[in-house]
Amino acid sequence: MTDRRNSDRRSQAWFGAQGRSGMLYRSWMRNQGFGHEVFDGRPVIGIATSASELAPCNAHLTRVAEAVKRGVWQAGGLPLQFPTMATGETLMRPTAMLYRNLMAMEVEELIRANPLDGVVLLSGCDKTTPAMLMGAASVDLPAVMVTGGPMLNGKYRGQDVGSGTHVWKFEEDLKTGRMTEEECFFAEGCMARSNGHCMTMGTASTMACVAEALGMQLPGSAAWPAVDSRRMETAQAAGRRIVDMVEEELRPSRILTRAAFENAIRVNAAIGGSTNAVIHLTALAGRVGVELGPDDFDALVREVPTLVNLMPSGTYLMEDFCYAGGLPAVMAELLGGGLLHAGPITVTGRTVAENTAPAERVGSDVITPLDAPFQPAGTGIAVLRGNLCPDGAVIKQSAASPHLLTHRGPARVFDSPEAYHAVADDPDLDVDENTVVVIRNAGPKGYPGMPEVSNVPLPAKLLKAGITDMVRVCDGRMSGTGYGTVVLHVTPEAAVGGPLALVRDGDPVVLDVPGRTLRLDVDDAELARRREEWTPPAEQYVSGYTWLYTQHVEQADWGADFGFLRGGRGHEVPRDSH
């Protein structure tokens, strides 16, 4: 075994210290049964785990951490596991997104404050992955991501069902009488039948793939199911690899380059990934000083077809994606077509091209070839501009109805998602299939936290009439498991005086996705008059974290991060108070 001892390591400011300080640090660690020999200068590897029974997607990460430890020990390091908060979208109210920045702060400070030379990040649910990446990037110690993997395919009455995606479908079936309450109750257990995160191409699967595309996760590791033994093999390999990364001083700042972000954006288009990737990648780029804005997500994907046939845009699920070759097979297709940068370095110490060279695509149904894609180029995320969204809005074209991508209709305005839900089942609700449902005050500051509420279910009267989609416009987000013609992330949001605050019932809303515009067909003079009458909503919070959030959160086009967290703060060893 290679001798990993080094008296100059960061961790030796603690464990190699002389006198009282060193004695304190080492002696307290030894109450866990560590022998004196583990403080000999070998790399100390933190295992940051967001395991929590309050975040079902992450509940199994304690077992994943054990596999990482085996790898660290194998490579001659000292593994030390520590907990972080878990921002699970499944249970947290009002939204896990409210706490993404808090988790990023916690991860950053825990890494910096402790005797660590490198860190393995264990995440699962969709906000935990970007939060951990953001925190680790700001410290810039060697780091590797290990996501917890998707659940096994859901099964209901002989058909595959997708977590999240089929929640929307079953709700529609219930409202139209095609399904009973008892059948829905039974179907719940059929959707979520193993540990892991959503097995659709929702935000959790998307961000796992994005972490791999960025080069922060080992090749192929995004797709292994949570309960597959190879998930644990991957975790063990990550434990071995992080020790080498410490030796090589391979830090996030070397990996998270502009070229890496461009690769991730194009991969997100090819997999039919979540619109939430726009928010998270923009925030992460801000931590490492890479200029990235909404227009990049439009320009970079226009030539990229959708290659992956997964729910919510397609038919299959993550387990099928794994067995079809996983993300390396997708990246190999894109590289072959000149759509990815081949040279960015990754956590393996090798380039993107070297990592994907052995990739193999199995079959052509789940991962389609570049010359016969699942959906043609130009069906990825589109970024819209116009007098309704001067700083941008996004729409996931692959999940939208083609006939609605160009649409003009009267607005029906709701000042909150709750206001809409209160009347959505009213048979006399004044809407038809041409109506544009506008939901405002769901942005970063307005809700607060920018919840996944934009893809509200259709009014019951339209569902019963056989209408399956309508245009919805909102300053909030949409679940990556959702679908429909939904314009999201309208910026600036209504709560800070964005144009969405000025819309009134009946105003003509014009959506032109091919032309990349979203506008309100109301003359400028009238809008100016309405603005003079508009008053900002009263501040809801005067103390606590939510006050901090509403005071400092940036708009969606900046990634909804805190302004004071942009950029890095490094890993300088804090002062010793002993």
Image (cartoon, rainbow, N blue to C red):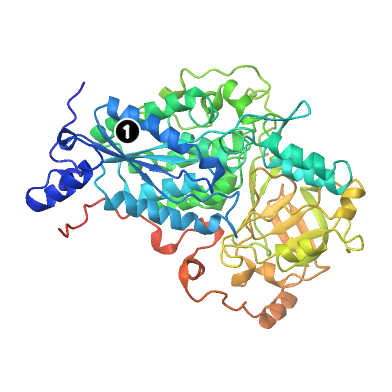
Please say whether residue 349 is visible from this viewpoint: no
The answer to which image quadrant residue 161 occupies is top right
x 6%, y 50%: residue: 19
Which residue is label 1 attached to?
A: 242
Q: Split into 4 quadrants, where in the image is the C terminus?
A: bottom left
Q: Residue at x 54, y 52 (%)?
A: 279
User: Would residue 402 be found to the left or right of residue 236 on screen?
Assistant: right
Query: Measured from the top left, where is residue 401 in percent x and y?
Result: 78, 43
Horizontally, is 132 left or right of 166 in the view? left
Q: Position of residue 318 (x, y in %)?
A: 61, 30
- Figure check: 364 above or below 89: above
Quadrant where the N terminus is found in the figure: top left
Nearer to us in this view, 262 or 48: 48
Residue farthest bottom in this picture: 533
Does residue 348 appear left or right of residue 303 in this picture?
left
Pick out the residue farthest to the left: 19
Q: Is residue 452 above or below residue 410?
A: above
**Image label count:** 1
Mark 1 closeness class: few <14, some 14–19, many ≥20 residues within 10 Å: many
| Quadrant of res 154 | top right
Disc 1 residue type (three-letter): Ile
569 vs 162, nearest the viewer: 162
Check the image and report above or below for 558 versus 203: below
From the top left corner, tell me how far across and down residue 212 is, in percent: 47, 34
Q: Nearer the viewer, residue 554 or 261?
A: 554
Q: Quadrant of residue 388?
A: bottom right
Q: Is residue 267 visible?
A: yes
Secondary-structure class at tag 1: helix
With 75 as the anchor, is 262 left or right in this view? right
Q: Position of residue 542 (x, y in %)?
A: 50, 76
